[in-house]
Image (cartoon, rainbow, N blue to C red):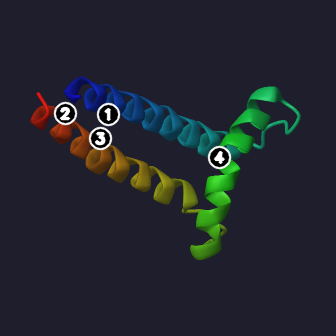
Amino acid sequence: MGHLFEALATVINMVLELYMWIVIISALISWVNPDPYNPIVRFLRSATEPVLSRVRRYVPAVAGGMDFSPIIVILAIVFLKVFLVGVLGDMAGKFR
């Protein structure tokens, strides 16, 4: 049972890490006015916009149009990585 929790923690950690990089790349791409028909840009938008739009409902853009939603999503991902993956790792240790 401990190996199951360890494997689950590893997979969740990898998925969260990948999604964090997708959010970072999407935020960086938004600074350079990308071609909206580019398949990579379309993928990045479709992968991040559902989450970012939910955050934008609660955190409006500040003066100058600065959007803090990617930062908030990245902080949430880091929290989940530390908390959730840590708890699963602790559970794995207890079941060994």
What's the amino acid at mark 4?
A: Thr
Residue at the spot of label 4:
48
Name the secondary structure under disc 3. helix
Residue occupying image coordinates x 57% and y 36%: 22
Q: Quadrant of residue 54?
A: bottom right
Q: Residues within 10 Å of mark 3 (few under 14, many from 20)?
A: many
Compute the Cα span from label 2 to label 3.
10 Å
Residue occupying image coordinates x 11% and y 27%: 96
Instruction: Please determine whether, in this image, residue 25 is positioned above or below residue 39.
Output: below
What's the amino acid at mark 1?
A: Ala
Q: Nearer the viewer, mark 2 or mark 3?
A: 2
Residue 9 shows which numbered tag?
A: 1
Residue 82 visible in the picture:
yes
Compute the Cα span from label 1 to label 4.
23 Å
Instruction: Please determine whether, in this image, residue 5 is positioned above or below residue 52.
Output: above
Q: Residues within 10 Å of mark 2 (few under 14, many from 20)?
A: some
Q: Specify which label sits upstream in the sequence, 1 or 2.
A: 1
Q: Nearer the viewer, mark 1 or mark 2?
A: 2
Residue 92 shows which numbered tag?
A: 2
Q: Position of residue 32 (x, y in %)?
A: 71, 41
Check whether the beta carbons of the residues at disc 1 and disc 3 lie within 8 A of each other: yes
Q: Specify which label sits upstream in the sequence, 1 or 4.
A: 1
Q: Position of residue 24 (x, y in %)?
A: 54, 41
Q: Specify which label sits upstream in the sequence, 2 or 3.
A: 3
Compute the Cα span from label 4 to label 3.
22 Å
Q: Residues within 10 Å of mark 4 (few under 14, many from 20)?
A: some
Residue occupying image coordinates x 74% and y 34%: 43
Residue at the spot of label 3:
85
What's the amino acid at mark 3?
A: Val
Residue occupying image coordinates x 32% and y 25%: 7
Name the secondary structure under disc 1. helix
